[in-house]
Every structure is written in structure tokens, then in C-alpha cells.
Amino acid sequence: MNAFCDKFCFGLMRLVTYLVVLAVGYIIFDIIRHGLPAISWEFLSAAPRRSGAAGGIFPAIVGTLYLVGGTIAIALPLGMGSAVYLSEYADKNRFTELIRLAIITLAGVPSIVYGLFGLGLFVLFFKFGASIVAGSLTLACMILPTIIVASEEALHAVPQAYRDASLALGATKWQTIRTNVLPYSLSGMITGAILGIGRAAGETAPILLTVAAFFLPKLPKSVFDQVMALPYHLYILATQHPEAEKVRPLQYGTALVLLALVLGLSLIAIILRMHFRKKYRW
Amino acid sequence: MQEQTAGAEYTVEAKNVDFFYGKVQALFGVSLNIKIRHVTALIGPSGCGKSTFLRTLNRMNDTIRNTRVSGEILINGEDIYKEGMNVVKLRRQVGMVFQKSNPFPKSIFDNVAYGPRIHGQHDQQQLAEIVEKSLVDAALWDEVKDRLNDNALGLSGGQQQRLCIARALAVGPEILLMDEPASALDPKSTTKIEDLIGELREKYTIVIVTHNMQQAARVSDYTAFFYEGSLVEFDRTKKIFTKPKAKQTEDYITGRFG
């Protein structure tokens, strides 16, 4: 009976795992099958024409890259800083419990709420207008919990013995963290950043109200300019465009480029992570 | 035992030290003077407070939340728990070797150079000299001199522990605290560490916590027996192991409990 259950249960779990892979595989296959014909040099390098019904998506690619870059530049130092404070400095008390609860809650807030929050705070109150700054700040708020949680886990994974050894040699707390904790936890922190990149590049709702332009066939000149972004462009083409059926190949092309972009950025992060893992192994 | 150095006879003078983990008291009025350039062993059953006492001497207990110490600990006449005490300076003066060897996942060279570097020594020539001297003093130089840039985690357990000793020596301490430094090692490596302690006592004041009574008898000049947070007996090692005064000490060293 037990042997049967063992076989059956593990078989079931394996099946479920395969199903997940199958679903992902099908999505990717479908996007590549329909998207690849739309990809051309012009599509990648030219500005859109006729409300996106013709031409390329270059401004949207650039816009998304700017947004991801800005978001990581804001969220990574903030998130790492919070994680270091929480796990290395802060006492374990009611107050830090509250902070933790807030972070977990933040992770569960729907993305459109971040969009509205960004609109209220960054666009209107700070008068950044719909801009790369406002969009990046909004996206940064959204991915902050991911980065904090991943960074904290990475810090906890560093053996206490390293901290003790360093402190016992007369290092200050900060010297210890800087030289003997942060370097070993970098690879884990980068993992958090990878997850963050994926979300920041793909989310539509937070940028809808804070940065994304519907049709803007030129590149931004400053961080206070609006930009087009791939997910929003995709959303517009798929749902708002008067000729939604006709531009179907362009939608798939855009989706494919977005997918490739996220994978490419993640790949860079993974290579970085491997580099740090190899450097410090214990 | 003749004292060679001029000046103070004792490096460490503990007076009536109490220690608390939260509300739990772990040390009860411990008073103990540790003689300069001698080996003092702290023995006693698990939970008797010997490690806690050791860690009050370089204030490593500070890193544990919710702890409190009272009484007085003087190192070279200076109260190390006084207001505004420079803990960084204290820990340069009082080095520590831990139970489980804990080299950093860096090269052998960088491990030993770590201390001097954080204290501002960046001259490559000077660092190289310090590293060599420390490794020689820790009886490890001959085994690693050709692979200083290899990762320290590639060394054997015994070598790692001697590397940790070298790392502690590199900042130039006067006192070396050792918390069961050989308890995780094989007999051969243990012998090496014990021989090393015998050599180091020429230059350093050593306080060693050990579970192993034979080890205490072999390496130490003085032995302190702790029981349930109190110092029961403190005397020359020879005396403790041949003619202990307290019944508890006798029971412990003869293996009747512990």
C-alpha cells in the first residue's frame, strides 16, 4: 500500500511539474511562431507609424530599457540597505515585526494600486509629471519587497562564524558587513534583482499612469520625458487599437521582443551571479 | 614558576563578574586573575559558564542581544566595560580562536592579512611580512608557503584551525582566547595545536576553554574549574589535578560527572 502510494504520489507530482513546463513551453512556442515573422530590422530599429499599425517599436524597446535600468538603480540600493538594516542592525522587536509585515503586505498590493500611488505621489505631488523618473520610482516601490526579502535571505545564509571571526579581529560592525557579509550574499541579492527585472519590464499597470506614452515616435531627451514601453505598447495594440486584428503579427512581434529582452537582462544577471558564486564558495 | 617580565604579573583581573542572558544568570561572582604569558585552562561540564566567561574577556558577548555584565574586568589595568571603552582596540589586544575553524572563503594570504588590512595596513611589503611571520608562528608556513593564493577552505581541518590562529596573531594581540580549539579535530591535528600552544605561551597570555581534561593537564599552567556559573577552584594545574581542594573538582576530574 505504502509502495503504491509512494509511486502514485510522486508520479502525480512529476506530472504536475511537467504540466508547468508544458504551459511555459507552449506560451513561448506560440509567441515565437507568430512573432518571428514580424521581426525585421525595421521593426527593431524604426519608430512606429500610423498609431503603431506600421513601422517599428524601437522607442518602446529603449523606453523599457530605461525604465528597467532606472528601477533597478533605485530599488537595488534601497532594498539592499533595508535588508542590511533589518537583518544586521535592527533589534528583533515589535517595531521591526511591523516593518516586516509592511514589506509582506507591500508584496501583495495589486500593481494598479502602485500605478495610482505613483500618479498621486510622484507625478502630481512631486510634480515629476508622467516621466521616466516617476515610472521608475513607481516600479521600484513595486519590486522593493522582492529585493528586500531575497537580500535578507541571502544575508541570513552567510554563516554567523564569519561575522564572529571578523568582529573578534577588531573589525567594526560595518567593516564586517562590508568585507565579510555583503560580498558573500551578493549572488543571492542578484537573484532578487533578476526577479525584480522581470516584473519591472513586464508590468503594464504601474506605468500606465506614470510614464507610458500611447504613441510617441521619438526617443526621450531627459529623465523627465515620457517614453513608450513594450508592455503598454502591446496592451494598446491588442485591446485599444482600431485595427487590432490587422496588427496581430505586430503584437506577437512586440511580445517576442519583450520576452527576449527580459531573458537577456536575466541572463546578464545570472552570469553576474555565477561570477560571485564562484568567487566566494563555502 | 618565575616571572620574567617587569611590571604587572596579571594580564587579566576579573572581579566579581556576574553575567546574564536576559533574566538567566550564567556567571555568579567570578573573580579570577590570569597570569601574563602563561596558559590558563577553563574546565567544567557543559553549561558551567566557562565559554561565557571567556567571551566576556574580549566582549564578544556584546554581539548577543539582551545580555548584561556586572562586576569588573581589568585588562592591563584598564576596565574593559567602562563607559566609552574602545571595543575595536580591545579586540586587537585580545584575539580569539573559535571552536569550529572559521576561515573566510578567501585566499590563505587574504585571511591572515584581513586583520591588519582593516586596521589600516595596506603596504604590500609589510602585509607580506606580517602574513609570513604569523603563519610561521602558527606552525603553518611550511605547509602553505607555496599556495598562499589558494582558497583557505581547501585546507584540512587542522590546517584551517592553525590558519585561524595565524589570523588572530596577525593583529598583534597580547592575549589569545581559545574556545575548545581542538574539539573538532582528529588526534594528530590536536597534538599539533597543543604543541603550538606550548610555543605560543612564550609570547602570549593564553586562556583556553576545553572539555578534554587530559588536554588541560597537558597544555596549561593554571586551571580554573567552573560549575553552574561559579568558579569553584582555581590553582596551578598540577595542584588541581593531583590535590584538588573542592570535592566537586575532584569528582569532575576523576570523571564522576560531567
Image (cartoon, coloured by chain):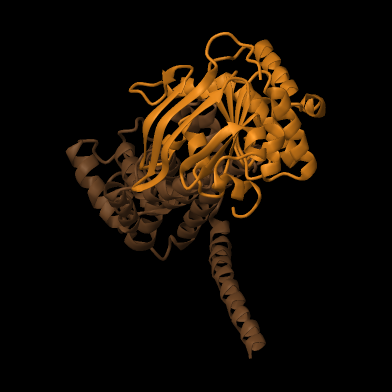
Chain colours: A brown, B orange
What is the quadrant of residue B27 in the picture? top left
- Looking at the image, residue A137 lies above or below residue A37: above
Q: Position of residue B187 (x, y in %)?
A: 78, 44
Residues A193 and B63: in front is B63
Left or right of A5? Residue B157 is right
Report the residue that reaches farthest toward the bottom. Answer: A1
Residues B161 and B30: in front is B30
Q: Position of residue A27 (x, y in %)?
A: 53, 66
Residues A144 and B55: in front is B55
- Number of dots carrying numbers: 0
Q: Quadrant of the N terminus of chain B?
A: top right
Q: Position of residue A237 (x, y in %)?
A: 38, 58
Residues B135 and A207: in front is B135
Left or right of A195? Residue B82 is left
Asked if residue A230 can be seen in this view, the reply is no
Asked if residue B200 can be seen in this view, the reply is yes
What is the quadrant of residue A85 in the picture? top left
Report the residue that reaches farthest toward the left. Answer: A125
Question: Which residue shows up at 52% across the image and 13% down it?
Answer: B8
Left or right of A117? Residue A151 is right
Question: Which residue shows up at 72% across the image and 27% down it?
Answer: B198
Question: Which residue shows up at 32% across the image and 41% down it?
Answer: A137
Report the residue that reaches farthest toward the top. Answer: B6
- Looking at the image, residue B7 lies above or below residue B219: above
Q: Position of residue A50 (x, y in %)?
A: 37, 50
